[in-house]
Image: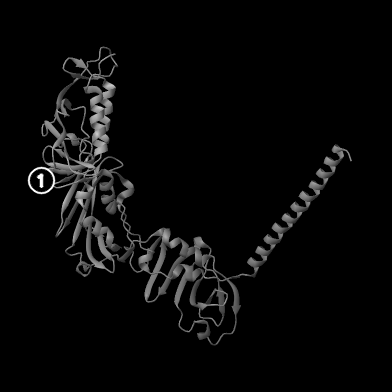
């Protein structure tokens, strides 16, 4: 057979196969659709629907009786209209009674105990403009469905489990809980925690270099006068106040509490205030009060609210007892280089004084430039910038208490435009086989690796020492 004839035969066979597959698939889809339709037809409608027409729903789950009614399009607590109800939480309950079906029915029942209906697990009542239905829910059937008795009749229905899935809840599960305004926070500016044993305040300072020798870290632990005590690592500070701004109420135990003492909230063991800028730019705040612990959780409320919640006790633990030594900023030499006027570097027994000046643009639109000189010699600006970058990038392993270390291997003194810290001194002293003790202003102590400090020294020597031309 010629090649063209063979291709034509193969194409014809392929078309036959595709046609057969399409027919089989189409028949399969039709069969599935027909089976679904037949299954739907076999379902017994025991609903109170349609959904938009359901006007009330009530249930009793282990003694927790809840009654909700639709008023002017809004679901309210029928026994107390002031009770805040979560509209989204009610919606699946309404949908359940509006679409309720049974797969089977058992008529003329006299022994309801065998279906768990002599003493039902719970009861649901749903009303619409056309009818009011009472559903008593019993035990599960062998197929995993539930036996349901409707309106006290002698018929038992086998229901798929929608009632059991949605109504085994109490009032606290449909309450609209207050919201921590974290979604509206554009930036947190302060955190204040007051407890009997450990009170503190953290504050964000835009112009950090006005109050500290370095402006690299804007978060500070401040004293009772608001004066900065030490800069803190930004990432760890965000994680700390995130315990409050990201707080999730796990349960509302009482929505209108009058006895706060019963929860330890009459005299809270911890109060947390978060100050923040809203998306609109206004300065706002919220305050949380923490009461007694309860099996690993802790009672909490928004200040002045009567709604009492439970949250994980680890939230309060983390807020009450932060490790500020571990949270301290560990970039001891990240200076505000725009404020530096001069720097004296003592390396290997030699002393170098570098002076910074700023050029005045000769033409409109030009940017001023930093000029560095060592005596009469102008320094390579790119090399100076590389040294500044290595200073900024130098991260300490840890912060330590006052320690002497051994001999000084490198020292730097900076004169800067800072009223509180006009002079910044940095010494690197021998400490152990792998680290130097970095002493800032004679009072801040850090441990830095030899590698990090040696990089600073070598980058400095690149512009300090003039290599003779060949």
Q: Crowdedness of circle 1 by 10 Å Cα count: few (<14), some, many (20+)?
A: few
What is the x, y in percent for residue 460? 23, 27
State the residue at coordinates (64%, 70%).
42
State the residue at coordinates (85%, 44%).
9
Q: Is residue 457 above or below residue 368?
A: below
State the residue at coordinates (21%, 27%).
338
Query: Where the C terminus falls, by quadrant?
Result: top left
What is the x, y in percent for residue 129? 50, 66
Query: Where the N terminus falls, by quadrant?
Result: top right
Res 150 visible: no
Q: Is residue 285 above or below residue 153?
A: above
What is the x, y in percent for residue 164? 48, 71
Under circle 1, the secondary element is loop
Q: Is residue 35 left or right of residue 244?
A: right
**Of 361 and 22, which appears nearest the observer?**
361
Q: Residue furthest top?
A: 362
Q: Is residue 56 above or below residue 414?
A: below
**Of 264 and 107, which appears nearest the observer?**
264
Q: Residue furthest right?
A: 1
Q: Is residue 418 left or right of residue 18?
A: left
Can you identify the residue that label 1 sits on?
Answer: 225
Residue 374, quarter of picture = top left
């Amino acid at each position: 057979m010629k090649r063209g004839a063979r291709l034509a035969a193969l194409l014809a066979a392929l078309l036959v196969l595709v046609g057969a597959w399409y027919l089989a698939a189409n028949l399969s889809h039709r069969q599935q659709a027909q089976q679904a339709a037949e299954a739907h037809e076999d379902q017994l409608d025991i609903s109170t629907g349609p959904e938009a027409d359901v006007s009330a729903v009530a249930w009793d789950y282990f003694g927790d009786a809840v009654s909700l009614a639709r008023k002017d399009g809004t679901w309210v607590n029928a026994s107390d209209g002031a009770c805040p109800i979560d509209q989204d939480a009610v919606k699946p309950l309404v949908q359940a009674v509006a679409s309720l079906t049974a797969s089977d029915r058992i008529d003329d029942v006299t022994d309801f105990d065998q279906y768990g209906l002599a003493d039902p697990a719970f009861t649901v009542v749903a009303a619409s403009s056309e009818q009011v239905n009472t559903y008593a829910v019993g035990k599960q059937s062998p197929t995993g469905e539930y036996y349901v008795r409707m309106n006290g009749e002698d018929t038992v229905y086998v229901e798929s489990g929608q009632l059991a899935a949605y109504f085994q809840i109490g009032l606290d599960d449909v309450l609209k809980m207050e919201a921590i305004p974290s979604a509206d926070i554009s930036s947190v500016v302060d955190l204040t925690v007051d407890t009997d044993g450990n009170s503190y305040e953290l504050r964000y300072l835009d112009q950090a270099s006005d109050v500290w020798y370095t402006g690299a870290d804007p978060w500070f632990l401040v004293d009772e006068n608001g004066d900065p005590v030490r800069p803190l690592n930004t990432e760890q500070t965000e994680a700390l106040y995130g315990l409050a701004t990201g707080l999730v109420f796990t349960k509302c135990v009482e929505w209108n509490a009058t006895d706060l003492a019963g929860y330890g909230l009459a005299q809270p063991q911890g109060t947390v205030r978060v100050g923040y800028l809203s998306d609109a730019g206004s300065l706002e705040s919220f305050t949380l009060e923490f009461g007694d612990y309860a099996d690993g959780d802790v009672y909490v409320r928004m200040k002045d609210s009567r709604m009492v919640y439970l949250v994980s006790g680890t939230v309060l633990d983390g807020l009450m007892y932060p490790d500020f030594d571990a949270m301290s900023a560990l970039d001891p030499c990240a200076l505000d280089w725009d404020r530096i006027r001069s720097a004296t570097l003592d390396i290997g027994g030699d002393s170098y004084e570098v002076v910074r000046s700023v050029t005045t643009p000769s033409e409109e639109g030009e940017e001023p430039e930093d000029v560095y000189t060592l005596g009469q010699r102008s320094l390579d600006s790119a090399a100076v910038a590389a040294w500044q970058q290595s200073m900024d990038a130098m991260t300490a392993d840890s912060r330590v208490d006052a320690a002497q270390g051994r001999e000084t291997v490198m020292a730097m003194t900076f004169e800067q435009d800072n009223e509180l810290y006009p002079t910044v001194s940095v010494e690197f002293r021998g400490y152990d086989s792998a680290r130097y003790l970095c002493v800032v202003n004679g009072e801040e102590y850090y441990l830095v690796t030899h590698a990090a400090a040696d990089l600073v020294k070598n980058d400095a020597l690149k512009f300090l020492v003039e290599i003779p031309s060949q």
